Amino acid sequence: MDAITRIQQLGMPRRNNELWTFFPVAKIPAQEYACACDDSEFSDLIEKETDFAALLPIAKGAKPMVQNIADGASEMAMLKCNNDFGHTVLNIGKGAKASLEILDNKVVHEIAAERFDINVDEGTDVEIFFANPANDVPLRFRHFRITQAANSTVRFSSIERGNGITRVSIDCFLKGEGANFEIRTLNKLNGTSGSHHRLHIYHEAPRTTSTQFSRNLLDGKSNASYDGSVIVEENCTGVNSSQLVNTILLGEESSVSVKPILKIYHDDVECTHGNTCGELDAEQMFYLVSRGIPKETAKSMLMASFAKELFQALPDTPAKKRLLQQF
Amino acid sequence: MLSIKNLKASIEDGTQILKGINLEVKPGEVHAIMGPNGSGKSTLSKVIAGHPAYKVDDGSVVLDGKNLLEMEINERANSGLFISTQYPTEIPGVNNVEFLKMALNSKRAYLGLPEMGDEEFKKLCEEKMTLLEMDERYRDRGVNEGYSGGEKKRNEILQMAILDPKVSFLDETDSGLDIDALRIVANGINHIMSPEKAVILVTHYQRLLDYIKPTYVHVLRHGKIILSGGPELALKLEEQGYDWIEEK
C-alpha cells in the first residue's frame, strides 16, 4: 500500500480521532499528492500506520535519506531537512554511541513535515535532540518511529519555542529486554503558538523502561498538549515507566491539556503518571525581588531554573550542553 | 535613618496584625525586638519589605527621607533595606553565586554605579565567605537548596555582607544555629555593622545578644511595642518571661 492511499483511507485528521484530540485540526490545509515518490519499500509500515503526520512526508514525495552508523561507532551528526517534507532513516549498529541534533528547516512555507525512522540495535546509546529557535513556520509536524533492541538507550530531548503550531508524534517500540527510552520536552511558548506531543511507548520485552518528563512555560494565548500512552504487553515482567508533566501558566489565556493512558497487560510492572499546573512560586518571586532584583528579571530567573531542571539529569553529552545553553 | 510611625497592617481576611508600630532607628544602633510567638514580629519585617500577603492600613516607614511603603519591593532593597526572613526560601535551579551577583548589580544599577565584573565580584564573594567561614559548596548549589536551617541563616548573612545595606532587619537569625555557627554569624554581623548602618534583630533569646550588644530592646505584643529599654531588659525577659509586663 502507498502513503497516499493510506491517507485517503484514514481521511484528514479530526478531533474525534484520539490521536488528534487536542490539535487544532482546522489549521491543516487541504493537501494535494501529485508528486509521491516510490514508497513501495515502506508498504508494510504504511499499511499499519494510523497517524496522518507519519504518512504525510512520504505522500508528499520526500525521498528517504538513509544513514547507517556502524557497530561500535561513536558519532555526532546533525540532521537537517532542506525541503518542506523530509524522511530520514537511521540504522544504528550494535554498541554504537550517537549524538544526533535535528536542525531547524528555515526554508518552510505553509506546512512542514518530517519523518524519522530510527532503528537502534543492541547495546547502543543514542541521544536525539533539538532546540528550535523562535521562527514563523506556521505548521510543523515531526514524527519519530523508534525501534529499540535489547539493552539500548534512546534519550530524546527537545525545546519548542516557535511562533507557529508544532506537533511531535513518537511511536517507540521497546522490543529487546532492558531497552530504555527517555524523553524530556520543554515548551516555552507565547502569543498564539501551540505545541502538541503525542506518544505511544510499547513495552514489548521484560525489564524495559521508559521515562517521560515534560515541562511547559505558557504565556499569552499559547497552548500545549501532552497525549502520552504506555502499553505494556503480556509477559513483560519488571517494566518500569513514569510520566510527569509540569506546567506553569504565565498568561491569563494560556492553557494545557494532558492525557495519560496506561494499557497494562502484565501484573509485575511499575507505571506512574503525574501532572501539575500552577503559576510561578510567589514566595520565590518575593525572595528574589526583596534582594533588589527587578520583577521581570526575577521572573526570567525562575522560568530559566524551571526549564533547566528538566535537562539537569541528562549525562554530560552534547545534548545537555546545547539545551542548557538556551537559558 | 529609619522611622516607623503608626504602622498598621492586615492580612487578606482583614485581621489586623500590626496595630500601630512606632520605632526610631538611628545610624550605629542595634535594636532588638522580642516578644511572644504571634505578636507580629515576623509580620513587621515582611510588611516593611513589601510582602504581597499584607495590606498596609496606615502609617509610614521612612528610610533616609523616602517612604518605603510607596516603593516597589526591589526599590526598597536597593535603597538600603535588607530583610532576612525566619524561613529563607529555597530556589532550586537558581545558582547561589549568580543570584548574589544579579542582586548586587541590580542595586548598583539602581544607584547609577557600573556593573561589577566577574573577577571583582569573585574577590568580594570570597572575602565575605571567608568572614562567615563558608565553604565552596555554597557556590555551586541553588539558592538555599537543600541547606540545613543553620546553613540558610549563614547564607542570609552572606547576602547581607555583599549587598551592604543601610538597615538590616534580621528575623530570628539565631534559630537553627549551633553554638559555633551562632558565634560565626554574630561575628559576621558585627563585622558588617558600622556607625553609618543599623540592625534590627528579632530574637527570642539573650544568647544572640551576648554577641551583638543591642542599643535598645523592645517588647512587641499584640501588634504594638509595649515596652522599650536598654540591654538589661533582655536579661529580665530571659529570667521572668513576658507576663510581668502585662501585670504592669
Image: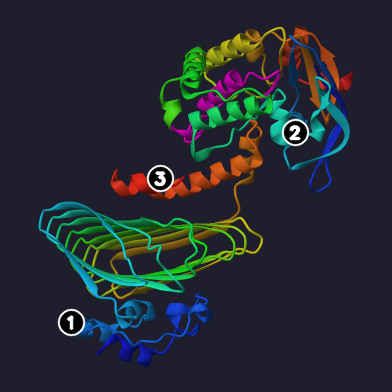
Residue B57 location (% of width, % of height): 87, 38
Q: Nearer the viewer, mark 3 or mark 2?
A: 3
Distance between mark 3 and mark 2 Cα atoms: 39 Å
Q: Secondary structure at mark 3?
A: helix
Quadrant housing residue B232: top right
- Chain of the residue that carries numbered disc 2 in the rendered image: B
Residue B70 location (% of width, % of height): 82, 34
Image vertical order of residue B188 relative to residue A155, above or below: above
Q: Looking at the figure, which quarter contains the C terminus of chain B?
A: top right
Report the amino acid beneath label 2. Answer: Thr
Which residue is painted at 63% across and 14% down in the image? B208
Is there one chain holding both mark 2 and mark 1? Answer: no
Residue at the disc numbered 1: A41
Residue at the disc numbered 2: B43
Report the amino acid beneath label 1. Answer: Glu
- In the depicted view, which residue is nearer to us: B76 or A150? B76
